[in-house]
Amino acid sequence: MEKTECIEPITAQQQAEVVEATDRCIALASDYYGRDFASVTVDFDLKGKCAGMYQASRKQRRIRYNPWLFAKYYQDSLNDTVTHEVAHYIVDCLYGSRRVKPHGPEWKGIMLDLGGIPRATGNYDLSGIPMRQYQRFSYRCSCRTHQLTIMRHRKIQLGRAKYL
């Protein structure tokens, strides 16, 4: 089996461009909705198959980007992923994140308002992208043995999930 060469993450200059694009998208939303939305923290610490992720807690809101996927698909990510994640941020500001579905009608409307295409996921070739490896646990049912991630295993152990 041929080993795929690992992609290098985006440069500091490109990271600055992504932060600027994020701020421009937030400014566009501010103009469109007639209210000020604060800048959001941007981190480049996401790994795996996700190009971006919006996170909100009581203390902070932030957008995380995958610097390897951005490197491989820079222009697409700059256009699509930035708008996608900023739309999640704007939904949170306007509606609260607990009141709406992550890719529901509110998010789709904001994506359209910001000039984006309301797609929930991208379809990327992940060769060369570092992937997080999770420990797997074997669970047997009547049809076969399933390999569950440590996250699902912990939910089962804590009684928070039951899989049939």
Image (tube, grey):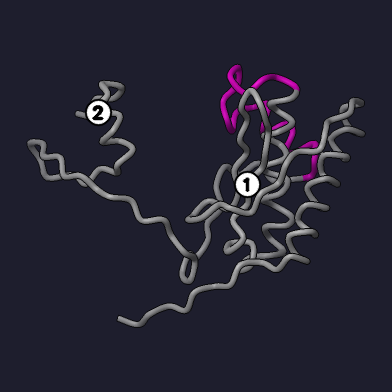
**With 133 as the anchor, is 85 left or right in this view?**
right
Q: Is residue 48 above or below residue 71?
A: above
Residue 89, by quadrant, is top right
**With 7 as the anchor, is 133 left or right in this view?**
left
Closer to us: 70 or 55: 55
- Which amino acid, by three-letter code, is at mark 2? Ile
Name the N-terminal-most of marks 1 and 2.
1
Residue at image location 27% in from the left, 24% down from the top: 158
**Dot 1 crowding, Cα within 10 Å, few <14, some 14–19, many 20+:** many
Q: Position of residue 50 (x, y in %)?
A: 53, 51
**Dot 2 crowding, Cα within 10 Å, few <14, some 14–19, many 20+:** few
Residue at image location 49% in from the left, 74% down from the top: 6
Label of residue 64 in the image:
1
Q: Position of residue 113 (x, y in %)?
A: 80, 36
What is the magenta range?
A: 94-115
Q: Is residue 122 above or below residue 88?
A: below
* SS for dot 1: strand
Please name the residue that numbered disc 2 is placed on: 156
* SS for dot 2: helix
- Magenta stretch contains residue 110: yes
Label of residue 95 in the image:
none
Residue 85, by quadrant, is top right
Q: Quadrant of the C terminus?
A: top left
Q: Residue furthest bottom?
A: 2
